[in-house]
Image (spheres, rainbow, N blue to C red):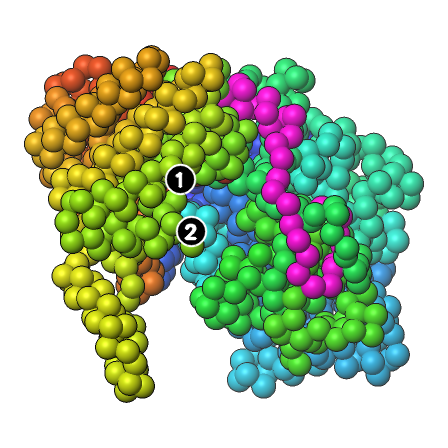
Amino acid sequence: MQGYVYFFAKNEAKGSAELRSLLGGKGANLAEMSNLGIQVPQGFTISTEVCTYYMEKKSYPSGLNEEIKKNLKKMELITGKKFGDLDNPLLVSVRSGARISMPGMMDTVLNLGLNDETVKGLIKQTGNPRFAYDSYRRLVQMFGSVVLGIPGEEFEELIDKLKELKDIKQDIELSEESLEELVENFKELINEEKVDFPQDPFKQLEMAIDAVFASWNNKRAISYRKINKIPDYWGTAVNVQTMVFGNMGNDSCTGVGFTRNPATGEKDLYGEYLINAQGEDVVAGTRTPWPLAKLEEEMPQIYRELYEITQTMEKHYRDIQDFEFTVEKRKLYLLQTRTGKRTAQAAVKIARDMVKEELISKEEALLRVEPAQLEQLLHRRIDPEAKVEVMAQGLPASPGAANGMVVFTADRAVELADGGRKLILVRKETSPEDIHGMAVAQGILTSRGGMTSHAAVVARGMGKCCVAGCEAIKVNEKEKKFIVNGMVFQEGDYITLDGSSGKVIKGDVPMLDPELSGEFREILKWADGVRTMGVRANADTPQDARMAREMGAEGIGLCRTEHMFFGEDRLPFVREMIMAQNSEERERSAKKLEPMQKEDFKGILREMEGLPVIIRLLDPPLHEFLPNYEDLLVQITKLKMQGADLKEIKVKEKVLQRVADLREINPMLGHRGCRLGISFPEVYSMQVRAIFEAAAELTREGIKVFPEVMIPLVVNEKELSILRTQTVKIAEEIIKKEKVHFEYRVGTMIELPRAALCADKIAREADFFSFGTNDLTQTTFGFSRDDAEGKFLPLYIEKKVLKEDPFQILDQEGVGKLVQMGLEKGKKSNQNLEVGICGEHGGEPSSVKFCYKIGLDYVSCSPYRVPIARLAAAQAKIEKD
């Protein structure tokens, strides 16, 4: 019976890629590569079950130590070396391995097994004392930081001091004697913390395994899981692997790469390497690496071998691979492979190209592209007409453009972002501890590191713009400034990044909206050929409607008329209409607005020719259009104190009295929606006339229109019946008078729990339902969206009272049940009823999939989220089939 430890070696492994949940991604792929006959340094994986056991009981299952020792013996037999041996020591690495890649979020220890005696054995074994002490100082430094918790900067300060003393620039220039001195300096630093660096290799191994399991719950890993919605209970595996050394001289190297370009998707071996280095040097950004293309010049045979192996892996996994490799004395080893993180641009191109290469089907291609990731393709870009001052050139690590205020620490970024500011996080290099700051920044700029540095990998995964390795900028994080070409930039100064070209630009540069690439359009065309649920857009202007159509919307699911009333030319008439004392006054005011409304509707209907347009009648609380009560009081008091004309004061007091009459304690649950239409029928009559007169005029022009009138905020069928009758009467009068014919419909927005519960009765008066999930969420939870998100909701999510923000992701257990109930009751009562949703959830992938599962006819979302909804709807169909 297999226990907790799984061995792997070339052509021999207990695990496979199918055991990802047990072995983690790294361990599962090491086993898979081993079984494929790829040269992988042998080792073993301690399963994720041990991690969950350890987290719960703070101890290990019985028999684990015996399993570890048994597998160490296997490694010793294969290598001919022995762990802890004074003459021929076996050294190992200890690495984490979650089932989903979490780059840099958890801990690693390399060169484990070295001590004051075995380092001499390593010198005897290799004949290379500099290499031996370089490996030893790395172990002490990493062990001190990762396992003993001493800040890594303290070790770096000791290195910098020694380099300054020796007048050298790079770590690689440190001599054997200097490295031996560093080892002692590092051990003294550790001793100052009242602990000793353990000389027993087995104790080192035990402590390192503890540290890697514990790192599952470090601050950066928790932040990363929260951002990427990775469950806490998954845990991590631990991989113990024979060390191979890229730091044995100029015939050795280490690198990371991708089988395709992860930024663009181009089919070309992509990555970086360093001669005479260990893997951490490449990803840490402390030295600027060479592109893999140069390896073809330096070690052509190794490059060819690497190319062939990685292409084999890509064909086997049928997806882009992110791999690590080491060359030790001109012998190539693959250290790991995993599915490569990629930008949305690359994801779309790779999915499309792999279909063309017959590696995957169209359905698989659609599942390969994450709908939420498509928002990256909708990033803004720098206006090519803008005059820009390029200050520096870095590496184009993650595409898109971003501008904002300079900030130098992750904590400060979070603090300023809470105030609504746009930020660019500037660092020498980012580390996993910066994850929370990177999450809130618009872009990231680093002075060190390459295209596979921590900043680059994490930024691409987040869809953030990133310029890395910009050596021209001199960053002083302590003084919160950077200097470039004699210019000093401090916190609060604005810069712009172009992550597609690597340019760093002075100031806040104008941006342009994105365009859809040919590959993107092709993927979406495949999605449209698969999905059966419609996708519409929420649009309130002709410009919005035009963009919605460009993005592939099949109509407008929500046009909010209240957004049309806030213009300076309209607000006085709106106030006049609302504050009218009787229906005659209200009618006169409404007539002033009607021509403006008609032109609004003509513009939108014209843009959406041949497609349905749902127009919601006026819905907001009346107070949004009225003067502020307190401001009026102040004005009147000032007028009286200044001895103003009594007539002027009386006019103000009359306005104040009307505002007082219309004031509400809770306006969001007050006189709005259909209640306004029933109380003030002149308001809705004006809007309905404007809609149908616009439709009639366009029909005479030969433009095919499909207007649909939405009555908001109903609680029962009687409300809808009254307003439907009024709407139909006006529509038929206009059609008859203008001698035209066009189809129209009258429906309602279901945004209150009672409406969902009584949907069968309401459906008898409706041609369509549209679930307004924003208000439905508010009224179901009893949360004010504005207050909740600004006060207690983040705490609820942090403390796991709620899994997610219900205003961002549809609450399927509560609000979703009401939607499902309303849908089923409505369709049962009215078989011809069309049903969709038009809240913000209409563009959120998991919510879209829920809508498909319960049988909605369409979803509606903001124009830029339409492509996301189209893809999510297709994926929902594929996943269900």
Question: Residue reaching furthest right?
Answer: 297
Q: Residue at x 48, y 35 (%)?
A: 542
Q: Is residue 355 above or below residue 849?
A: above
Local SS, label 1: helix
Nearer to me, 574 or 764: 574
Nearer to me, 572 or 803: 572
Going from the N terminus, do you reach mark 1 or mark 2 first?
A: 2
Residue 510 in magenta stretch: yes
Local SS, label 2: loop
- How many marks the image carries: the answer is 2
The amino acid type, in three-letter code, at marker 1 is Met
Magenta segment boundaries in residue numbering: 500-527
Residue 223 can be seen, yes or no: yes
Q: Which residue is mark 1?
A: 596
Q: Is residue 788 above or below residue 364?
A: below
Q: Which residue is mark 2?
A: 569
Which percent across, then down, holds residue 61?
36, 53
- Tags 1 and 2 in contact by the CB under 8 Å rule? yes
Left or right: 308 with respect to 647?
Answer: right
The amino acid type, in three-letter code, at marker 2 is Asp
State the CA–CA distance, disc 1 to disc 2.
10 Å
Q: Residue at x 87, y 38 (%)?
A: 296
Q: Is residue 295 above or below residue 161?
A: above
Residue 822: name its quadrant: top left
Crowd class of label 1 (few under 14; some 14 to 19; many from 20; radius 10 Å): some
Left or right: 345 with respect to 817?
Answer: right
Nearer to me, 111 or 768: 768
Residue 848 can be seen, yes or no: no
Q: Residue at x 28, y 21 (%)?
A: 734
Residue 37 in magenta stretch: no
